[in-house]
């Protein structure tokens, strides 16, 4: 990167996110977030002031991946596991303030947390009356990731990515 990257004045105004402003300041577009992240990382490695860049995901979709059937037993097991961790933490915190029974407090916290977590998991799932009998993981996914430069840095960012071989001009 050349020294001209630091020749731009620094502004701390709120970023504009309207379509007309972004169209003139879009440096590159990527199909995957990892590719946009690599571009910013490369610019950072080359000394570019990356605090003037944004990665903006467009055309967002909620993806819910169903991971399995959720029964009362599985809900109780998941609750017991969470409760065990919580009970262990509480036992550890209480054990810090004792003079010798800390191991007993750890075991007691683990057992009590497991029992209460299992009960809450079981009855919490039973209360839904079958309205949601599956487990899932949700994520937001964009179909396009635009690398946008603020404060007059768009041309310098394009130049840096082109020199790095990460921007193909057609």
Image (tube, grey):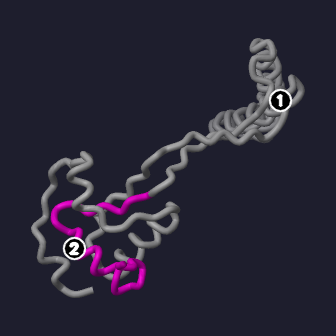
Q: For this view, does 131 lie left or right of residue 41?
A: right
How many residues crowd around disc 2 within 10 Å: few (fewer than 14), some, or many (20 or more)?
A: some
| Residue labelled with disc 2 | 155
The quadrant of the rendering that contains the C terminus is bottom left
Specify whether residue 147 is painted magenta.
yes
Q: Position of residue 144 (x, y in %)?
A: 46, 56
Q: Position of residue 122 (x, y in %)?
A: 82, 20
Q: Residue 37 got which mark?
A: none
The residue segment tinted magenta is: 145-170
Dot 1 or dot 2: first in sequence order is: 1
Which residue is drawn at the image coordinates 52% and 62% (left, top)? 32
Q: Secondary structure at mark 2?
A: helix
Vertical order, 124 against 145 (above or below): above
Q: Position of residue 123 (x, y in %)?
A: 80, 15
Q: Quadrant of residue 4?
A: bottom left
Camera-nearest label, 1 or 2: 2
Whether the residues at callouts 1 and 2 have beta carbons within 8 Å, the answer is no
Q: Quadrant of residue 159?
A: bottom left
Vertical order, 25 against 170 (above or below): above
Q: Residue 70 got which mark?
A: 1
* Pick the front one: 27 or 134: 27
- Is residue 3 shown to the viewer in this render? yes
Q: Position of residue 14 (x, y in %)?
A: 19, 47
Give the alpha-carbon distance from disc 1 to disc 2, as whole Å.
52 Å
The quadrant of the rendering that contains the N terminus is bottom left
Specify whether residue 41 is painted magenta.
no
């Amino acid at each position: 990167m050349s020294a001209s990257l630091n020749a731009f004045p620094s502004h701390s105004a709120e970023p504009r996110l309207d379509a007309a402003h972004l169209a003139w300041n879009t440096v590159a577009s990527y199909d995957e977030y990892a590719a946009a992240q690599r571009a910013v990382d490369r610019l950072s490695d080359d000394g570019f002031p990356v605090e003037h860049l944004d990665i903006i995901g467009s055309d967002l979709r909620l993806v819910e991946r169903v991971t399995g059937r959720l029964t009362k037993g599985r809900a109780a097991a998941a609750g017991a596991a969470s409760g065990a961790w919580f009970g262990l933490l509480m036992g550890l915190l209480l054990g810090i303030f004792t003079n010798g029974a800390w191991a007993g407090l750890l075991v007691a916290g683990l057992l009590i947390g497991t029992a209460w977590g299992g009960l809450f998991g079981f009855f919490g799932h039973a209360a839904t009356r079958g309205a949601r009998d599956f487990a899932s993981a949700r994520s937001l996914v964009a179909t396009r990731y635009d690398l946008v430069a603020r404060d007059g840095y768009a041309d310098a960012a394009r130049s840096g990515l082109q020199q790095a071989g990460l921007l193909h001009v057609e």
